Amino acid sequence: MKRLIFVVLALSLCLTGCSSGLTILSNYRRIENIELVRTVTADISGEGVNVAVCGTAGEESVARMYEKTGSSLGVALGELILLPLGRDAILSHTENMLIGEDMARERLNECLDYIERFSEMRLDTGLLIVRDGTARDLLKGLTGEDTPAPDVIAGLARNISKTGEGYFFTCREIASSLADNGCALMQCVRAQEEEKLFEARGELNIVPAGFAVVREEGGVEFLSDQETLGTMLILQKYKSRNVDLSLPGGVVTVSVDSVETKVEPVFKKDGSLERMSVRLALEANVICLKGEADLEDKALREAAEMELSRIFREAAESAIRRSRELGLDYLDLESILERQAPLKAEETLRNWEQVFPILPVEVEAESTLQRTYDIVDPPQDAKEDQKPWEKMIRSLKGS
Amino acid sequence: MGKNDTITERQLTVLIFVSLLSPVIRVLPASAVQLAGRAAWLSPLAALPAGAALAAFTRYARKNAPEGVGLQDMAQLALGGVGGRIFGVLFALWLTFYGGFVARSASERLLATVYPNGSASVFIAVMFLVALITASGKTKTLSRTAEVLMPVLIIVIAVVLLSAIPDVTAESLLPVTYRDAGKVLYGAVPIFNVLSAFVYFLFLTGHIRKPRGERPRRFPWLALLAATAFGVTFFTLGTLGDKLAISMENAFFMVIRNLKVLGVAERVEAVVVAIWIVTDFIFLAAILMIVSEIWRTVTGVKKRGAFVPPSAALSAGAAFLIAKNAFTLEAWSDILIPGINLILAVIFVPAVMGIGKVRRKY
């Protein structure tokens, strides 16, 4: 029996994958040869698909990029990994997939299916649509000696919601939304040509280009910046944004750091659904002032708050309007209604497709200016006719 | 059976717990979601009372059974020599086939999650070799192995489920209203079916030696198993949503594929799958042990060791031949296997135990 145990244990060594000689693992790779792919692009190329990858070798990001064209995404990526690159490319740590506009319009499901099915890839891979050009060209343009494209894209992913310009939806979120709503939101980006302020950077920069709405049956619609902001507000993906408010006496720049969104159904006395109510509660801080607006003046502050509320309310209204025009409930109003009043709204939910385009949705926004960061009377720009001693007297009066 | 191959009631219960983790993951959340939709995360809790009732009945039925008497002995006492032996042969054949199904499912899971280009045959062969060695040994050894592994498994499950919390969304789980009660109960059927498999382990109760004052405490372990099933269903549904989860065979492992543990470790699925495969090994070894125990009692032979290799060979044959591919295996997994299990474990075993009780045989 002991001999048998020994034989079994010896055989089980074949399963460890610690040596290429003993392993039965067909995808065995030596760790020093591995190149971890961090970004994948997918574009339509004739009848097939062009893919390009860029990744990490050892502990450092590298600016190496490889590409391959095949009849499908699976074929192209499969061949790319097996190409004699000098390294073994693996997709296990892919952070983002950039998808060309045409590819997203015609073959998005192929990308989703590949990621879901291929055990090497993760469902939390971010999926982005590249507008006005191919994803491959964007990746190539981004790549500079000191600016590997995956690092640049990762930086955008970290900070995009802090500028209020978008949100990186993952494959999981997109697939789940497509399954639930028949449509899903995706972040778009585009290449932007910029002067190279240092030689080691790439030729292009990547900038957010709003949300796109993709349909389960194929097809893409693009949202404007205002509609994207409104969508982020309603879906509570918003984090922060700096906004200029034109007021009597100057322009106040505020940082809108907190938005609390409440979406609720409002019912009539007879129990039928009257409307959906969207309430936005904004909190902002003054970060910069241009001109002579006196923020000590309560009336001026109220004017600033009203202006801020208007901007955000209009953004939310435009998002709702567009969602209705498209006939796609990517704002999850049905889901919110179902969650908050599952029994009361049963009839409405049953006829949701007819109700959705005509359902009144009321948006209210309320803003509060919280603080000016201790600067009550900010320094004024020097005017040509102002003498130095006048400036000094003015500053002394202020103190 | 040897006098020194004895286990305690607690050890048998831990063996049941560790073994049944394997089918829990195979069945959930897909089968519950198919029946209960978004409300499926409540189904494991709904299945618990039925599982507890079955456990209470079997405990009552063998309350006065003498020490050293297992389910097969009880069947022969209840149905007489011939009837009892037919009962035993029926269960031995079924469990031999079921062992093959368990091994094949486990190997398919390995291929789907970690070794996409591997071969199911190699995994099946290794699983049966290890299970053969384990099942040829003492019941005590297997039970103690389960005891040692249990805390590891509980910690892994807890860490995995807690790490999934950030991805859970309310809209994937709610609303659930009283109108979903029927669906929840319907979704509880496959979970109860898995829980009910504990009755197969009653064939090993002949090995139990009761320390003074110890009573069978199956309920807390069934509750822990139901809680695990609840956690698996809740976090998978909460992360993926019911419609996406239903389109996946191993939705729980899809969730694991995404996990970042405490923001430090990622791609932990290989470790989790490797730990999970241990439960498959234990379950398979326990099945071979049960089958050989049944044959020993049916034939009246003193030692069961001789029955293990042929049982393992037959079971391995079933594993290879049961399905040509994963699609056929899924068809087995959906209707036939649960159906046969439900008839044998929930109807046959309690009926035979009840007959023995009514006839005052024990």
Image: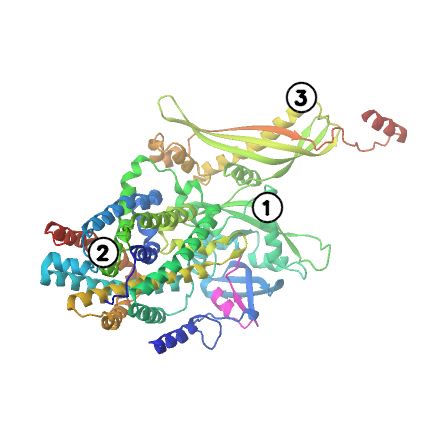
Q: Please report, as a chain letter, where disc 2 is located.
A: B
**Which quadrant of the figure contains the C terminus of chain A?**
top right
Inspect the image, locate mark 3, and give the three-letter code of the amino acid beneath it. Ala
Q: Nearer the viewer, residue A231 or B285?
A: B285
Q: Chain of mark 1?
A: A
Q: Secondary structure at mark 1?
A: helix
Residue B9 at x, y = what percent? 29, 55
Q: Name above or below for residue A135 compared with residue A10.
A: above
Which residue is labeled 2 in the image? Answer: B341
**Callout in the foreground (3, 2):** 2
Where residue A309 appears, x then y in whole percent? Answer: 59, 29
In depth, the one of B109 and A304 nearer the eye is B109
The residue at which mark 3 appears reads as A299
Task: Give the magenta part as a residue range.
Answer: A76-94
Inspect the magenta stretch and tell me whether residue A360 lies in it: no
Q: Please state which amino acid type lies under the numbered disc 1.
A: Ile
The disc at residue A160 is 1
